[in-house]
Amino acid sequence: MSAISTRPREQAAPRRPAPRIRPPWWRSRGLKGIGYTLPTALVVIVLFLVPLALVFWMSLNRWPLLGSPTLNAPDNYTRIQDNPLFVDSILFTLKYTVLVTIMLLVIAFGLALLVQERRPGVGFFRTTYLLPSGVGFAAAALLFYGLYSNEIGPLDGILRGIGLIDEPIAWTGTPNTALFSTIALVIWRFAGFQMLILLTGLQSIPLELYEAARVDGASRWQAFRRITVPLMRPTLALLLVLSITGSLLAFDQFFILTQGQPDNSTITMVMVIYREAFFRFNLGSAAALSVVVLIVLVALNVLQLRILRHDRTESEPS
Amino acid sequence: MGRVAPGRARPLRLTIASLVVAMILSSCGGGGGGSGDESTGKAADTGATITMWTRSATEAASRRLVDKYNATHKNQVKLTPIPTDNYQPRIAAAAGAKNLPDVFAADVIFMPQYTSKGLFLDITDRIDALPFKDHLAPSHIELGTYQGRKYGLPHTLDLSVLFYNKVLYEKAGLDPEKPPTTLKEFADHARTIREKVGGDVYGTFWGGSCGGCYVFTYWPSIWAGGGEVMNKDGSQSTIDSPQSVAVFNTYNQLWHEGVVPASAKDERGPTWTGVFPKGTIGVMPMPSTTLGAMPDNAKVKVGVAPIPGPDGGESTFVGGDSIGISATSKQPDQAWDFISWTVSDEAQVEVLAKNKDVLARPDLANNKYSKEDPRVVLINEMVGKGRTPYALNFGQTYNDPNGPWIPVARDAVFGPDAAKALKDGAPKITESLGQS
C-alpha cells in the first residue's frame, strides 16, 4: 500500500481533468451521514421497528391464526392477569434465571481457571469443554431426553450397574428434578462457551501483575480476589447480561425436555406465548404477552447497565 | 462499558426475531372464512405437477401412495413432509397467504377446524359420484363434513388396538389365544403377568403424561362401555360419566398395585410405543401402525385384539389423516385425480394392504394380502366400529401439553380418587372446549 500511495501520480499524469462541480447538498456532512447510515437504518426499520409496531398493533386486536382480526383493545392486556399459566411462568422463569446464571458462571469460571495456563494436554481439555457448544440446542435437548428416559436411556442402567441407585430415577418426574435436569443440560451446552469468553478475559490480564503480587507476598487467593476478579469485571458483566437475557427467554430446553411438566411446573414465559399463538391460535393475546416480556427485558437491561456503570465509576481512580 | 453494550441489544433482537417470525406467520392469517367454491370438473391426468403437504408422522404411507401414483400416471405429485409439531402453524400461515399446496393431508381431529375456516374445496359431488362412496372410513368422512358438505377423503388410518405378548401369556400360564374381552379381564391378565413373571416384566403400560395417548387408548374403552367423552358438538366434556370413571378406576388400581412400570407416570409420548417391543409388557393398547415394526422372536410374539369396555364390547380410536384439495388450488381436477386414486381398489390393495397398512375402505378388509395375517383383517374391520371424536378446540384441550386434559387424566390415574378427579376436571375441560 505504501508503495502505491507514495508514487508521484501527479508527475505521471500532469494533465488532470478539471474538478467536477458538485451541487451544494453533496458537500453537506449531514446528508452524507444520512447516506452512509441509510442501509443500516433501513435494516433496522424493516426488521425491527416495523415488526415491533405490528406486534403492538396485533396486541390491540383479537387476531386468530385462521380468520380476520378485529380491534379489541385493551382486552389482550387486561386478560393477562386471568392467565394463571403466565403468572406462574414469570415466577418460574425468574427462579430458573437466577439458578442457571449463578451455576453456569461458577462452573464456567472454574473451567476457565483450570485450563488457563499452557500445560501439556490443556488443549485437549479446552476442546473437550467447548465441544458441546457445537451441538444445536434443540438436538442437545433431545439427546438429554433420551439420556433421562427410564425406558430407552442408559443413565439409569449405568447408575444401577455401579450400585449408586436401586430404583430408576424419575429425572423429569418432579418439579425439582425436572428443573435441575434441565439446568444440567444448559450447563453442559453452554459452560464451554462461557469458559472461552472468560479465558480471553483471563489471558488479557498482564502476567506482570501476578508476578508483582507474588513478589509482594500475596497468596493465590489474594491474587485471585485483588487482581483476577476486578480485571475480569467487564467480561463477567458481559456474560451476566447474556446469561440473564438468554435465560429469561428460555424456550427450547423446556419445550423439548419437560414440555412444561410435571403438572405445568416448568413453563417459561416464552412457552406461554408460543402456546397462546400456536395451540390456542390467539395471536393477539400472544402479541400482548410478547410486549410485556419485551418491556420487562428492556427494564432489566437498563437496570443492569446502570449498576455496571455505577461499578465502573466507583472503580475508576479519582 | 463499550464491551457490554452489544449485550444490551441482544434481548431485544432475540425477542424481536421471535416476534418477527410470529408476525410473518400471523400477518398471513387474515384470510379464511367461508367455504371453497365447488368445482365439478372431470378428473384429469394431464401431466400436471400437483403439490402436496403431509405431516412427518404419517409421511411413510403418503410417500408409498405418491410413488405408486407417480409411476403409473402422467400427473406427478410433489410431496413435502413437514414436522408434525409445526404442521398447524405452517398450514395457517399458508392459508392466510393463499399459498396452500394443491393437496394437503391433515390430522383427522383437526378437520373440523380447517373445514369451518374454508381451507378445503367442496368436493361433495365428486365424493358422491364414487362407486364406493358408502364404503369410505365413516369417521373420516364425518369429520371432513361441514354443514352438510364434504371436504375430505380418508388418507392414512391409525387405530388403537390391544397388543398382547403371547410369550409372556404362556409364561404366566394364560392362554395366548384368548386375549381379554373385557377391561376387567385386561386388568386381571396384566396382574397375573406381573405376579407370575415379575422382574423387569410388567402387566401393562401407557403414556401417563401424554394427552394424546390417553385419548387414543382410554377413550375406546369408554365408548365400548356405552359412554361418551363429550356431547355431540364437542362443546361439553362428559368425562365424569360412570363408564369413564370405571375405565379410569381400572387403570388407577393397576398403577397403585405396581402392575405398571414407574416410568409410565412421566412418559410424555415420544417413547411410549417403544416399551412393548422390548418384551417387558404383557398387554397394552397400541397404535395399529406399529404392527409392521413389531419383532417376532423368542421374547415377543404379538397378538392383536380390540380394546374392550369395562364389561365387554369393543371400540377403537380411528386416528390418522384426511386429505382434501385446498380451496385455492388452480388445478382441482388434477388434484382430484390423485386423491380419488388413493382410495381406489388398486391403491388400497396394491399399496396399503401390501404393506399391512390400515385401509381407508373397510369393504376391502379381506383382500389377498391381509388374509395372510388375521391380525390385519381384525384391525381393518375395526375401522367401521371405531370413533373419531369431534371438537373444534380439540388440540388446545387434549393435545396441548399445558392444556387442561393432562392434569385431569393424571390426577384420575395416579391420584387417590379417580371419580373425584374426573368430576372436578370436567368443568375445566368444558371451559377449554367452549373457548372462542
Image (spheres, helix red, strand yellow):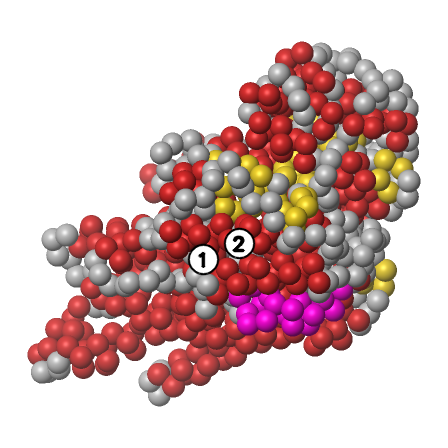
Please report the residue visible at 38 percent of the width from the left and 86 percent of the height from the top: A314
Q: Position of residue A273 (x, y in %)?
A: 64, 62
The tag on residue B187 is 2
Where is B373 relative to B31, above or below?
Answer: above
Viewer-nearest residue: A124 or A31: A124
- The residue range painted magenta reads B411-430
Mark positioned earlier in the residue sequence (2 or 1): 2
In screen coordinates, is B123 left or right of A221?
right
> Badge 1 sits on which subunit?
B
Amino acid carrying mark 2 in the image: Ala
Quadrant where the C terminus of chain B sits is bottom right
In the image, taking residue A208 as reference, residue A245 lies left or right, namely: right
With A111 as the anchor, is A49 left or right in this view? Answer: right
Whether residue A64 is situated above or below residue B365 in the rendered picture:
below
Rendered image quadrant of residue A150: bottom left
Residue nearest the observer in this picture, A20 or B352 = B352
Q: Residue at x 67, y 56 (%)?
A: B398
Residue A55, percent from left and from top: 71, 60
Camera-nearest label, 2 or 1: 2
Does the magenta portion include B235? no
